[in-house]
Amino acid sequence: RSFMKITFIGGGNMAQAIMGGLARGGFASADIGVVEPVAEARAKLAQDFGVKAQARAAELAALGDLVVMAVKPQQMREAATALRPRLQPQQVVLSIAAGIRLTDLARWLGGHARLIRCMPNTPALIGAGVTAAYATPAVTAEETAQAARVLQTMGKLIWVKSEALLDPATAVSGSGPAYVFYFIEALEQAAKELGLE
């Protein structure tokens, strides 16, 4: 079955990166719903992407087949708890929050099993990112393929075999550019010490 409808919980930068990618890929904005508590942000999401934005999950007519948890890590527990009564077992929940383990997310969602966790990096905002993702065994091959279609709107996608591999993948893709800058700064420092401007 294909994810015909998608619900975003949170309408920040990463959610917008995915929405922009979906729009470029010809995905219908009418099939996208967003829960965004800030009124100004809701208006901007409706204007920029033509999506239906509500202040709370309870206000949505229905949740999508894919529910993207795009809130800040410190807001995840509260957002998941609010989502819990609306969630159906067949819906797939995709988390893009840094550092939130799927065991915790599953608990906050009342034992929900169909979970995907991914870690996009900043270039995802312009569709040039590298995203590492892990899906729990409860997610079917077809659902994984559908989620991949969504995640590939941000750039390259790499599936990892265990959730534990998301942290090293993040260290490389997220922090990788910092190592390059650090190296360049060290070269500059060495040049100054040798008397160059």
Image (spheres, rainbow, N blue to C red):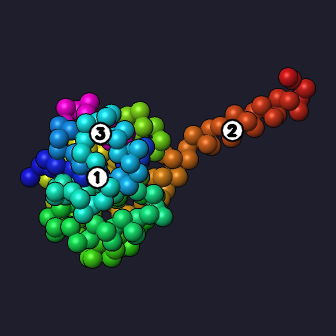
Mark 2 in CB contact with mark 3 (< 8 angstroms)? no
- Label 2's element? helix
Residue 18 picture location, percent across and down: 32, 41
- Label 1's element? strand
Query: Which mark is in front, 2 or 3?
Result: 3
In this rendering, the answer to whether 138 lies above or below 38 is below
Residue 45 picture location, percent across and down: 33, 40
Dividing the picture into quarters, in which one does residue 76 lie? bottom left
Looking at the image, which residue is at 81% across and 35% down?
Answer: 189
Residue 175 visible in the shown view: yes
Q: Earlier in the sequence, mark 2 or mark 1?
A: 1
Q: Which mark is residue 193?
A: none
Q: Which residue carries the number 3 mark?
A: 46
Label 2, label 3: how many angstroms apart (C-alpha)? 43 Å
Question: Is 62 left or right of 13, judged from the image as shown?
Answer: left
The amino acid type of the residue labelled 2 equals Phe
Q: Which residue carries the number 2 mark?
A: 183
Which residue is farthest right? 195
Q: Nearer the viewer, residue 78 or 19?
A: 78
Label 3, label 1: how many angstroms apart (C-alpha)? 10 Å
Tell me the quarter of the image containing the C terminus: top right
Looking at the image, which residue is at 17% across and 44% down?
Answer: 31
In this rendering, the answer to whether 51 lies above or below 82 is above
Label 2, label 1: how many angstroms apart (C-alpha)? 46 Å
In this rendering, the answer to whether 142 lies above or below 31 is below
The amino acid type of the residue labelled 3 equals Ala
Looking at the image, which residue is at 75% across and 38% down?
Answer: 186
The magenta span reads 14-27
Looking at the image, which residue is at 14% across and 53% down?
Answer: 142
The amino acid type of the residue labelled 1 equals Gln
Q: Which mark is residue 54?
A: 1
